[in-house]
Image: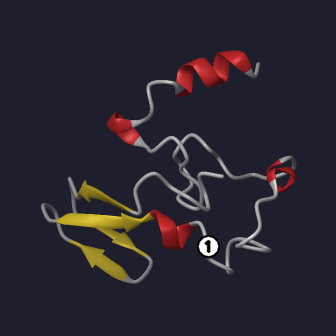
Amino acid sequence: MWRLHPPASLVPHRALETCKIMNYKIPKGPHVCVNLWALGRDPKTWEDPLTFNPSQFLDSNIDFKGNDFELIPFSAGRLICPGYLWLLHWFR
């Protein structure tokens, strides 16, 4: 459900070093906003982007821990959800 209805649509991040994302060069220093709303509805990534279908993740290689930007329900990096470790423990 977080994919379709993220708690925040635009999540600000700061580029700590110069990097290249797709064909865009992001220099060190500026703030960039990740549009979670658009990522969760991208038809290039999701088979039926406007439908809530949890079973699509059963055989998926998408890493929900924040390493694949198609799905970052718990955020990523230092600002990752504190309940994330509890979730990992619960579903072992």
Q: Please name whichever residue, 17 or 92, is drawn nearer the observer in this view of the structure.
A: 92
**Outermost residue, left direction?**
29
Query: Is 23 positioned to the left or the right of 73 in the image?
Result: left
Residue lying furthest bottom: 23
- Residue drawn at x 57%, y 54% is 68
Q: In which quadrant is the C terminus drawn?
A: top right
Up-down relation of residue 71 to residue 74 (above or below)? below
On screen, residue 73 versus residue 56, left or right, reads left
How packed mark 1 is, by other alpha carbons closer than 10 Å (few <14, some 14-19, many 20 or more), is: some
Residue 71, quarter of the rendered image: bottom right
Give residue 20's position: percent from left, percent from top.
35, 72
Q: For residue 41, what is the image quadrant?
A: bottom right
Q: Please give the name of the residue rendered at 55% of the width and 47% of the height, measured from the top-left corner.
A: 73
Q: Which residue is mark 1?
A: 41
Number of numbered discs visible in the structure rendering:
1
Residue 79, x across and y down, in percent: 34, 37
* Residue 54 percent location from the top left of the image: 80, 51
Q: Measuring 40% from the left and 83% from the top, which residue is drawn there?
A: 23
| Type of amino acid at the residue the image marks with label 1 | Arg
Apparent side of residue 36 relative to residue 12 in the rendered image (left or right) = right
Seen at 61% across and 76% down, the residue is 42
